[in-house]
Amino acid sequence: MKRNPRVFFSFRSPFSWMAMERLQRAIPDVHQRLEFIPYWEPDARTREALQQRDAEIRYAPMSKAKHLYILQDTKRLAAELGLRIVWPVDVNPWWEISHLGWLQARRMGAGSAFYKAVTEARWLRGENISAPDVIRRLAESAGLDGNAIVQAAEDPEIRAEGVEALVEAYQDDIFGVPYFRIGGHRFWGFDRVDRFIAELTGKPRSNGDHPVASPETHRPASVSANSTHCADAPALANIPAEMETEIGPYDNDTAGGCG
């Protein structure tokens, strides 16, 4: 059976967020044209369920040097897209509540609205999308029953659907996000978005294609994503002082799999 074009995404990854922004600008109905599949680092319950299916998450630990480079790179890429990124501080993140919440929102016919609310909260305002109260408020802002979205993380049926998504990622050899599939073609990472768009639309990709924000939508980046560990770089604004001693002060969970 022929599959629809699909994308593996994560609320955790800034590259996933920015890639989806580029797709949305090129293809306004992207949420209707693509099959979205969530991908995240699971909690203990989900990990156990994956083990029972002989599956795992293909995350690779990231070095401190690479982590610091990504902080700089995301700032540059966001600025090119005219986006104002506010890097969130993730302490003990619980990704089930947002990703399983998205699965519930999709069942309720508002997956794209919930996706937009969550990504804007995380990357434009630096909000903690692991907090139930935050997810409840974001769901309600998207016209959803906030309690139903929050409770999705404890719903056995939604949990099982989430496990299926991660098993599919494992069986499909997905090792990071964003990851795009169309027919037999695979495209991984932010830098492959234009090639995926060309394959999806059938329009040739010209050399040097790189979509940027229009003058009407351009918002200059006002936050530095450089680490305080870089001698020639200013600190990222609004980072709690006690976090500065951590190796990964801007994202305190495992850093692999961002794409």
Image: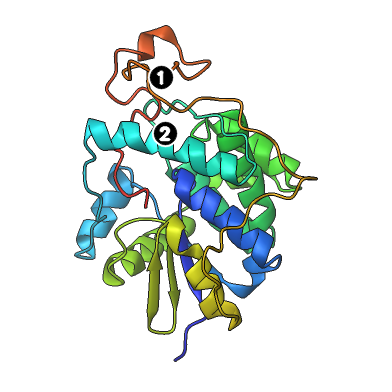
Look at the image and tell me in which quarter the N terminus lies: bottom left
Q: Secondary structure at mark 1?
A: loop
Q: Residue at x 29, y 12 (%)?
A: 245
Q: Quick check: can you spot residue 147?
A: no
Under mark 2, the amino acid is Gln
Q: Is residue 90 rendered to the left or right of residue 49?
A: right
Q: Position of residue 188 (x, y in %)?
A: 38, 63
Q: In the picture, residue 150 is in which quadrant? A: top right
Q: Position of residue 2 (x, y in %)?
A: 47, 89
Q: Quick one: label 2 or label 1, which is nearer the N terminus?
A: 2
Q: Position of residue 231 (x, y in %)?
A: 33, 15
Residue tagged 2: 72
Q: Sort mark 1 into few (<14), some (14-19) or many (20+) by Cα contacts within 10 Å.
A: few
Most distant residue in the top direction = 241
Q: Is residue 73 rendered to the left or right of residue 219?
A: left
Under mark 1, the amino acid is Ala
Q: Is residue 9 rendered to the left or right of residue 85?
A: left
Residue tagged 1: 233
Q: Residue at x 58, y 39 (%)?
A: 79
Image height check: is 75 above or below 167? above
Q: Is residue 212 rendered to the left or right of residue 35?
A: right
Q: Residue 14 got which mark? A: none
Q: Residue at x 56, y 63 (%)?
A: 209
Q: In the picture, residue 56 is in which quadrant? A: bottom left
Image height check: is 29 above or below 131? below
Q: Secondary structure at mark 2?
A: helix
